[in-house]
Image (cartoon, rainbow, N blue to C red):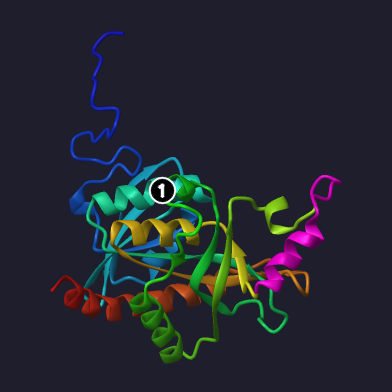
Amino acid sequence: MNNKIITNATNPIIDGKAPHLKCTKNDISEIVLLPGDPGRVRMVGKFCDEFRIVSENREYTVGVGTYKNISITVCSTGIGASSTEIAVLELIELGAKVLIRIGGTGVLKKNIELGDLVINTGAIRRGGSTNFYAPIEYPAIASYEVVQSLVSACQNKNQKFHLGISGSVGSFFAGQGRQILGKDFNSEAVLKEYINLNVINLEMESETIMTLGSIFGVLTGSICAVHANRITDEWLVNFEEPQENMCRVVLEACVDLHDKLINFNN
């Protein structure tokens, strides 16, 4: 190979940019929102006072903007634990202090309606990636400050919400009790276990964010719009409106968190 450019393989920072997010420290705010879907980065941006995309690489789209004079970064993680692990650790290395998952979820409670919001106080660790960092007994818990700000924002916006534990799973089909391609991988027992444990919802990223956040000393949380109810077997086909409601709520929470972060840093 001619003109080979070689850097450190252990932590390949190139021109000050993280290898996957393709961002520098100047691109990352202390408060970062983490949708799974790259398309939701621009959705959040619609509600900011100003917003711009700073990088797009693979499943990672990163945008930065302001809301009520608060600097906020939005970074997509892709689906599941492995890609979320990369995003979370590169963001922390670049200076992130608060990481909040935003996205969609399926619930395990009959009384929770499609379009409601779920704020997770913790998660069952079944994503996979965090097993390399901590024993399974190590808890995946949301930061109290983040939960409190999300709850207050929901109340101020008159948005219906529910609090509880997530089943954060590294599988969309069998791991969440779905039959697929004519095969049943014990789906009834999978769902029954979560229901018996009083798990409120199923998703794929929260435990990775919460566990790594605790290990590396940053604040974390999770708020999701309900796209599906596994008990009533309903799936919301058009979920843009609930997602936009979630964006409005989380941005208000960021304003409250900004003040808390000042005290946290002091």
Snapshot quadrant of residue 20: top left
Instruction: Please provide percent x and percent y for residue 11.
Output: 27, 35
Residue name at image x 69 percent, y 78 percent: 109
Residue 252 shown in magenta? no
Which residue corresponds to mark 1?
A: 133
Snapshot quadrant of residue 6: top left
Count the marks.
Answer: 1
Instruction: Please provide percent x and percent y for residue 218.
Output: 29, 63
Residue name at image x 44 percent, y 88 percent: 157
From the viewer's perspective, is residue 113 above or below residue 60? below
Image quarter where the C terminus lies is bottom left
From the viewer's perspective, is residue 72 above or below residue 169? below
From the viewer's perspective, is residue 169 above or below residue 183? below
Circle 1: residue type:
Tyr
Image quarter where the N terminus lies is top left
Nearer to the camera, 38 or 91 = 91
Q: Which residues are magenta?
A: 180-197
Instruction: Please provide percent x and percent y for residue 36.
Output: 49, 56
Mark 1, Cα crowd under 10 Å, few <14 / some 14-19 / many 20+, is few
Nearer to the camera, 265 or 182 = 265
Residue 170 seen? yes
Single out the residue that lies furthest toward the left. 266
Residue 236 seen? no
Instruction: Please provide percent x and percent y for residue 100.
Output: 39, 66
